Image: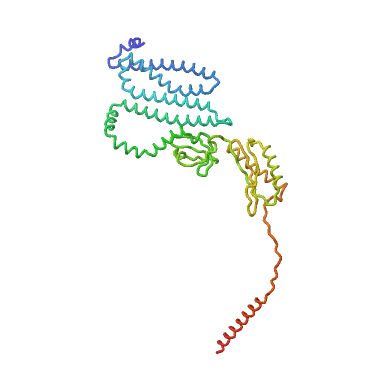
Amino acid sequence: MIDFIERYVTGLPDWAEPPVLAILAAMLGMVIALALHTVLFRVLNRIAHASTSDADDIVVNRLMRPTRWAFVAFGIVFAARETPALEAIWSRFAGFIMPLLTGWVAIAVLRAFVEAMIVRADITVEDNRNARRRRTRLSIFARIGTFLIVFLTISGMLASIPGVREVGVTLMASAGVAALAVGAAAQPALKALIAGFQMAMTEPISIDDVIILDGEWGRIEDIRTTYVVVRLWDDRRLVVPSNRFLEDTFQNWTKTTSQLLGTVFLYLDHAVDIGPIREEYTRQITAHRLWDKRAQILQVTDCCDATLEVRLLMSARDGPVLFDLRAEIRESMMDWIRREMPEALARRRQLQVAPMELSATSSMVEAMSGAGTATNGSGQEASRGLLS
């Protein structure tokens, strides 16, 4: 094929023949490569569409664009082997382009694999603990792998530049003090990066876990390499450093299972009859759509000076459902008590006391008469002083 092109460029001037031949050979290699790429991915698309799984479609779509450019590069490489002029030009850029394409394809393969595995880890089912753990690990390792691929790609691209390579060798010879300075400056970033590795291995949290942090209730929405995004109950986002979940205490409501126990407290009058209230609570909780049938009990847990504390224990499959169950049971029980047992509502009592009569004793009479005499005497003395 290259010989066929050379026949048509032999009539050109000597200065124009090499670049024209190089351009035509590169274009021919690119056309052949694109044709092969198109045929290959049409076959792969048919295979993916015939499959019932969405993972195949994700892999094919992710790899289509980067592999197209990789095929173009390989087409130019094969054409350059037969064309010295093209090879001389390509050799100047190959050390920069090939690492870039290799890194791009590697990242596409990594992301396609991660997304395909995430599709298989369905977290919409009721018991999704293992699926959430798998998604968490995939998310963390995908970001760490992407960082390493980008780092190696940039290193390979810079190493292809002779001037940069020589500067790098010079810097490596005197990198002792610089390494200490960079290490001290990058300590927070390195600490957060290491925390990401630790979180992937120890799993203190997983995607979609329900946690309470700094008094805020929310779900783990995303786990990055250095930070975690928590979606709060009112759709705010709390961005927390990764090492916070390894060094500080927090509540994880779905660490081993999403099932939870909850309580509702009623404060009633001391004279209340607990039996009918217990029967009504049993009737309401057993018929409730949100109760998971694991636990239900009514107990008197405290007796204060003004009220009687009654605790209603119940269970649900996860935190949000438990919150709704508690609110609905609290409302329905108080409504039933107001209608059927209004005497059970807490009230304040005042005891009326009859007036008390005090009889004077002889000692009290003597004391009062002595006080009166002293008062009269002091009054006379005062009047005498004024007259004088």
Left or right of 172 in this view: 69: right
Q: Nearer the viewer, residue 307 or 50?
A: 307
Left or right of 95 in this view: 272: right
Residue at the outermost right position:
340
Left or right of 99 in this view: 44: right
Quarter-wise, where is residue 144 in the image? top left
Left or right of 68 in this view: 331: right
Q: Nearer the viewer, residue 299 or 285?
A: 299
Residue at the outermost bottom position:
388
Residue 78 x/y as whole percent: 36, 15
288 shown above or below 95: below
- Please name the residue shown 44% across and 39% down the image: 243
Residue 93 x/y as whole percent: 33, 23
164 shown above or below 265: above
278 shown above or below 154: below
Label tally: 0
Look at the image and name its color scheme: rainbow
Looking at the rendered image, the quarter that the N terminus falls into is top left
Residue 313 x/y as whole percent: 63, 42
211 shown above or below 102: below
Quarter-wise, where is residue 158 in the image? top left
Looking at the rendered image, the quarter that the C terminus falls into is bottom right
Residue 374 x/y as whole percent: 60, 82
